[in-house]
Amino acid sequence: MANLQKISRVNFSIACLTVAVTGFFVWWLLQPSSPDQLLEQHASEFVEIALGLAWHRELEVDSYTGPQSLDIRQEGSAPPISELQLMTAGLLTRVKENVAVLQVDRLRKLEAKIQRLDIVLKSIIGVDTLDFDGEVKSLYELETGQDLVRAALPDTANLEALDQLLPGRGTLSFRVAAFRNQLIIPADKRRAVFEAALNECRARTLAHWALPDTETLDINWTRDVSAAWHQYDGNFKSTLAVNELSIAYLPSAIDVACHEAYPGHHAQFVMHEVAGLESGIQLEDTVFLLRTPTSVIREAAANFGVGLAFPLAERIKFEREVLAPLAGISFPDEDKYTRFLVLVDTLSESITPILREYLLGELSFNTASVRLEREALVSSPSELLLFADEFGAIGVGYQIVQRRLRQKLAASDDAWQSLLLAVVDTETRL
């Protein structure tokens, strides 16, 4: 009996050893055997964490065009954000160690992406949060300049000019709204007006950018979004969800069509993929996070692209001759309308310093809301401030980048090609 027990113990020990050796062997086989495999493993972890964040907060990721097997959102759940932050911190530590050893440029860039993701996750859970200047510098790589720090003082001269342009009773904001109401497109005409604007935006973009023949943009008319929302699906295809309320005003047809589609976000992502197919798209570059330097550049470029596709005089002509007749509305006095657009656009620059002081805690929500409406003529100031509460300094970031981009492209011999380079080159900084 004693011998049988001894044999049993020996057999059990051998079995345990076999399991342990087998487990170690399997673990060893799964370990990266080369720097390239190590990079892919780190990139996979980064993508999974980023998409885990998107499961909790959809707007944190603009688009994802990578393998569906890494998209944790397909599983219908994700680790808590606090756990995602710990995972990110651990990944960042390992990547930093490998950067020191491997000295690989791709790994350095991946480290920067992971560092920014860690900052975002910490800001969400309220750990080690950055102040305004720290956030602008760390997330968007914007160095503090005069356009970042100027005081939020009213643009008195342009406010007075607009006041004289729109005489009458009521506040200036009220009179601006009344003037805009002349340009409301009847509900049953909005789709036709938007599609006409979209086709013209595309034609003007194709005159300068070599978009692939297979690029497509599907329009989804829905009330499930508050405004227009672009989603890049990959393979030169996008989906644009549009709420008809977001294109109720005549000028919004061109604004939305150019900004979201051509030469805006759809065209940007298409041309980025074209460039990537030529140079190679890395796994970590298939997930497009919202709070990044490239994101604010894309947003600023989309805004700038509206005026590039439609210089003011051409815009007025197209709206008067094509869009207004389609909408069945009378076009306003051309000189007055032109002056109105210029003044409103100029006054919108007051948004940046007001938002900055709000994010610094120097203005209350109510005070900032009133000033945005009165001084920058923002029609939905509360919505803008709530966005700032959730996403921090990104609104300030892309307005600053837009201003700097405008200055840079003004000196370019070919603004279209310079704009294209700015959006396809992930190393562009302003």
Image (cartoon, rainbow, N blue to C red):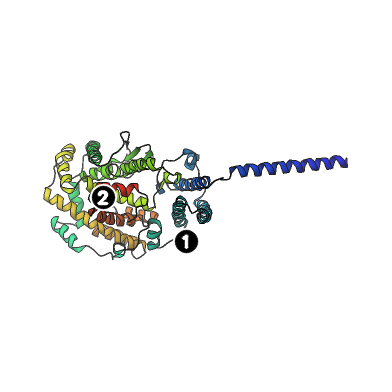
Is disc 1 surrounded by few (<14), some (14 to 19) or many (20+) residues within 10 Å? few
Residue 9 in picture, x, y percent from top left: 80, 43
Q: Nearer the viewer, mark 2 or mark 1?
A: 2
Counting from the top left corner in percent of width and height, residue 349 is at: 25, 58
Q: Which residue is mark 1?
A: 128
Q: Quadrant of the C terminus?
A: bottom left
Q: Earlier in the sequence, mark 2 or mark 1?
A: 1
- In this view of the protein, can residue 248 be seen by the observer? no
User: Marks 2/1: CA distance?
Assistant: 35 Å
Residue 309 visible in the current orientation = yes
| Residue at horizontal 34 percent and vertical 46 percent from the top | 424
Q: Amino acid at mark 1?
A: Asp
Q: Quadrant of the N terminus?
A: top right
Q: Residue furthest right?
A: 1
At label 2, the amino acid type is: Phe
Q: Are marks 2 and 1 in contact (CB under 8 Å)?
A: no
Other residues around mark 2 within 10 Å, as few (<14) / some (14–19) / many (≥20): many
Secondary element at image label 2: helix
Image coordinates of residue 67 in percent, x first then y, are 46, 39
User: 120 or 324: nearer the eye?
Assistant: 120
Q: Position of residue 182 (x, y in %)?
A: 17, 46
Circle 2 residue: 304
- Would residue 122 be found to the left or right of residue 395 on screen? right
Is residue 426 depicted above or below 237 in this figure? Answer: below
Helix, strand or loop under label 1: loop
Q: Viewer-proximal residue, 247 or 112?
A: 112
